[in-house]
Amino acid sequence: MPEVLFSEGGISVNVSEAMSLMSKKGYKQTGKREEMLRLFANEKRYISAKDVLEAMEKSYPGLSFDTIYRNLSLFVELDILEMTELDGEKKFRFTCSTESHHHHLICLDCGKTKHIEECPMDRFSDEKADFQIVGHKFEIYGYCQGCQSV
Amino acid sequence: MPEVLFSEGGISVNVSEAMSLMSKKGYKQTGKREEMLRLFANEKRYISAKDVLEAMEKSYPGLSFDTIYRNLSLFVELDILEMTELDGEKKFRFTCSTESHHHHLICLDCGKTKHIEECPMDRFSDEKADFQIVGHKFEIYGYCQGCQSV
DNA sequence: TCTTTTTTCAGAATGATTACGATTTAATTC
DNA sequence: GAATTAAATCGTAATCATTCTGAAAAAAGA
């Protein structure tokens, strides 16, 4: 569980940046989208679609899974969120557009992450592999301090 | 699609090794298990449960998904197969017990793989991460030569 | 062969995700 | 600010991979 919220300044910059990116791309600004983004900006960890629904049901009772999933895909498409698959479940996390390429150490319990600056692809020469390389995944799994004590 | 089968020697050694490991552990040797293993020994690439079912339905009509999945899990537990999750689907691949720790470059089309000897964890000091590390994943995705031309 | 335990079948249940037609809402135009 | 239009949302059903269940069949050991 996340203990500390970010300063309002930090949040609003990222969320409003994302919102204006959306309208620039022709997508509409809705209260639900903003609240979804606000949630991700606060959490800064990997959470599931179900987590999102549960967090938003309070303010939007009757909110549909369709809305959640459609917006999650949209956000990933626009690079506002990043996605990974853990244990057969898609998990999403806020992306800061200013961050350079990096990887994550991920807590399997709460989804909290730690950046890994180093990328194994840096020392991988893709010529000798007769594959056309289109992507890669490097993730380290574990339990964060908070979740170890449980 | 795999073009070349392995020499019978190579196959049978791996398959029979796996079969005797099973009976040593108290699991029964069945024709279905042997044919599943034979399939994986021939393919040497990541395939899905559905692929296995389709390949085996010819010799075992009416074969159930339950049988496939149960045996796949058993094989993974016994380190006979290795498993990864691609696009929300579990994919399985034959493991040679003699191979040391390694990673894969994986063809997103046919599941063909190429070994990557280098492991990014070798130069990752887990002390400074205040996470209890339990695992990691490093995979490179692309398209093999055969699948590029399509 | 007989017994015991495991495996398998057939189909239902689950859980995550996606699809659909109808309705509502945001952005745009007048 | 009302009318228009396109996108977003709802509610629910469909889909897809995977797991479960209880009964029947098959393998291993005595």
Image (spheres, coloured by chain):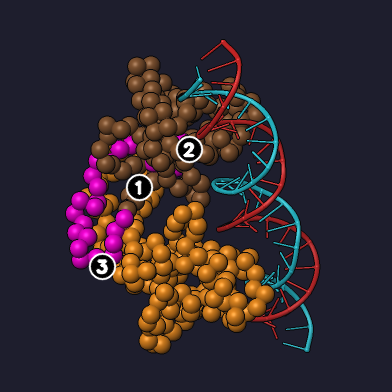
Chain colours: A brown, B orange, C cyan, D red
Amino acid type indicated by mark 1: Glu
**Tag 2 subunit:** A
Q: Which of marks 3 and 1 is in front?
A: 3
Q: Which residue is drawn at 24% across and 47% down?
A: A119
Which of the two labelled residues, at mark 2 and mark 1, occupies the earlier sequence position? 2
Q: Can residue B30 be seen in this view?
A: no
Which of the two labelled residues, at mark 2 and mark 3, occupies the earlier sequence position? 2
Q: Please give the residue where the numbered disc 3 appears in the rendered image.
A: A130
**Tag 1 subunit:** A
**Tag 3 subunit:** A
Above or below: residue A89 compared with residue B43: above
- Residue B86 picture quarter: bottom left
Magenta-colored span: A106-134
Q: How far apart are marks 2 and 3 (CA)?
A: 34 Å
Amino acid type indicated by mark 3: Asp
Q: Which of B109 and B76 is in front in this view?
A: B109
Q: Which residue is drawn at 20% across and 63% down?
A: A127
Q: Which of D4 and A74 is in front in this view?
A: D4
Q: Can residue B122 be seen in this view?
A: yes
- Indicate which disc residue A139 carries: 1
